[in-house]
Amino acid sequence: MRPTVPPGPKTADDVVGDRSHVPAPEPAADQPPGPGRAALLAAALTVVVLCAADAVARSYPFGPRTRNVNDLGNQYVPFHAHLWDLLHGQGSGGLLVNWQSGFGTSFLPDLGTYLTSPFALLVAVFPRGEIVLAVYVITVLKIACAGAAMAWLLLRLRPGRWWAAGLLGASYALCGWTVATASYNLMWLDGLIALPLLCLVGEWILSGRRPLAGVLVVTAVWVANFYTAYMATLAAVLVFLLRLWLAGLPRRRGLTAVGRAVLTFALGMGLAAPVVMVVYFGSAHASEGRFTQFAPVGTQDLLARLLPTTYSFGSPALFVGTTALLLALALPFHRAAPRRVRAGWTLLVVVVTLSMQWGPTHLLWHAFAEPQGSSYRQTFVVCALLVVAAWHTLSYGPLDRRALGAAAALLALIAVVASGSQLVRPFAWPVFLTAAAGALLGLVLLGRERPVLRMAPAALAAVLLVGAQLGEATATDAVATRMRFGHMDDYAPWGDRQQQQADAVAKADGWPRYRTDPGREQTVGNDPLEVGGEGAQYYSSHTSAVLSSTLTALGGGWTSGGRSLQSLDNAVTDAIFSVGARVHSPPDPHQNWWPQDGSGVTVTREVVPPLVTVRPSAAGPAFGPSPYRNQELLLGSRVYTVPRLTIRNSAGRQPDRSTDQRQGVRVGAKATITAQCPTGSEVYLWAPHFSGTARLTGTSAHGLTGRFRADWRPLTKIAAMARLGTVPASGRLTIELSANRLGVVPDQAVGCLDTGRLHTAVRQLTATGATEVTVSGSGGTIRAELPAGSRGVAVVAAPRIAGWRCAAGGGSAVRAGEYHGLIAVPLAKGASSVTCTFHPPGLRLGTAVGAGSLVSLVALGVLGAVRRRRETGRSKVT
């Protein structure tokens, strides 16, 4: 006889065909321990695999390869460094405004998007220079907790072997989506934890228990990361409806359960509204970026991602381990499981998988916004459903030959079809075949009673199944880690370069009298958050449209479709934005983009106007196509000469004009630009769609080299304006271009700056500008003392993002005006001070919704307590 599964509490699956209509109860208190052990096993297996894979891949902290790939290095590590600064009372700005980035940005949307997970607070216990290690520890802990949560859920859905639940919990935590996509997008890992927790809330709702805990869990997961919590909520709703259908409850009781579910999730999401609303409105005012059009992947690639050690950026990583996949495939054929259970879970897995491949449902999973980057961020939902289906197969007892044979045949068919995909590389087959053999043998042993090799069959099966899981998961994670280096940019961790920059910034700091820009030669997209200072650099999903468009009009550069803004090393913009100190560093040697010049970190200082200046009138004409003229509009003075250009290619001929949306002439390989400008003026080159180097010939170049890095795809990555030197005594300048790909040079590419006129403009703005500027500790209020009787318009050198309200003198605060993208305050009657206060859009609405949800929750709790007391009193009387 085959061993039977130990009896457990009656669940929704067990009442199929049973008309007692009892909803799934909580397991009895005297039930043998299992969930705790399973959770610990899942967490332990997960940590072992993650660390072993990084050791195999020689990735930090177990090898020399940096982990800082893509947005992990550009965004998430710097934001955690900024959180460290805030927790230790350092940095410029506070919770409301981050004055370090983008010349002043709203911080609450970034906080809610990247840093509201409770795990993020762990950075406070690490040294400032070990933020990368802190982020790694947080990543491992999140993935381990996801495995533990899934293992706990499985034993609440169905009783079964605790070690098997732990194994499948680890399968979920180490799924392909985790190791290939989410391990370097650590905010998404909160969704990996959220899904099993929300499904557990559904079980509490079905059993009518823990209503308060259910609401608080929903709140916690939506606060941690609302983006993946949204996906997890959709998945939990589908699971809840399936469980409700399997329970076979009468209509009235079923509707009551649905009502409890709606109320629980509504209250939980309502309590999270102060965070969610701020993030939503932050996204609404953000730069649109440049998004890719969704296209479903082919069947071969889709099935290939079920196998171990496959990797690609643009396809869903469905790997959950061969054991879990075999069990999920066997469910339709496992006769020990009720028919409705087999049909329901199998259909749910198939439907959700297909929903990833259809445009409308693809958008539904992504909250109706086409994602920038990976198109299959909801893949963890399918992985979870595969694991839950696998658990239902195993929990109803060992597989018979029919079910196991059918599953093995389907697995072989998947492998045959997937073999036509280029994603299945030669090294995948040894890993897959070994894991498949171990999984099949282990599942066969589970159905035996007699000892094998003097071991209990279940013990030997556990060893085989765990070993197969450890091996293939480690290999898959290691392959994903190694292959990311070939597909994505990577960035250096904290080292001597960043420490020298941080020391230079700290020594030159004068905020808020003036800004200190950490420099044009950036290490990551959020350098100010890592090394300090107050610059234009900023990379976030919430980079405001007004900031992006303003800096672009002034000649700034950006990547990531306009969401990663770069520093602009320009004397005029430094005067406009009150950049009084600027750090200059050599190119980052980790990138190896340009030859190293051997120079160290230096600081230049300039006398600049204060952060708040007074202009005689409101803004004039709108920005035009020339960044030099746009800078003059903001400065209020004519300081540039924009000469006629003569451009010749290496053959001495005039290049052809661009035929796409980039205006100008096409330049490839070598080319020269010649022009006539006033002697001694500074030469700037603006070539946003050029990639390569530019040098001013002659000694007046002072050894400067303009480095431009535009992408070959229009409007994906543009280069910033660069200073090349001074115009020689002859007044004739020649610029040599060396392109590394075909690019475009605009007709008004060269601007010659008259530094004398600039200094005159600076003196005038300083004389009429603020005599003192203060910024509140939260960063949300800026106050400027002006010369008595000031008239015209006070202009704050900060982007006019939504949420600013200003008052002149003792007047009432009104919505801030705009001066070519900057904050403007009319001074019609004359005023001696200006005060501007920032109110994050959505915060008041979110707070109101949260307060209403809290009042409703308290009221429902009181009513419930009163009702229970009355029922207790009636029972005593009876």
Image (cartoon, rainbow, N blue to C red):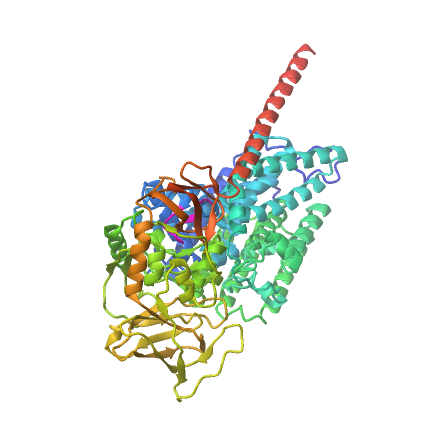
- x, y percent for residue 51: 39, 53
Residue closer to the observer: 872 or 73 = 73
- x, y percent for residue 512: 31, 47
Residue 704 lies, with reference to residue 816, above or below; the image says: below
Residue closer to the observer: 543 or 635 = 635
Residue 544 lies, with reference to residue 149, above or below; the image says: below
How many tags in the picture? 0
Q: Determine the main secondary structure of the stretch shown in magenta.
A: loop
- x, y percent for residue 513: 29, 48
- 100 inside magenta stretch: yes
- 427 inside magenta stretch: no
Residue 44 visible, this angle? no
**Quarter of the image where the C terminus is located:** top right
Q: Specify start and end residues of the magenta stretch as a single range.
A: 98-108
Residue closer to the observer: 157 or 316 = 316
In-image side of 870 versus 429 (left or right): right
Q: Name the image quarter holding residue 203.
A: top right
- x, y percent for residue 785: 34, 42
Q: Name the image quarter holding residue 763.
A: bottom left
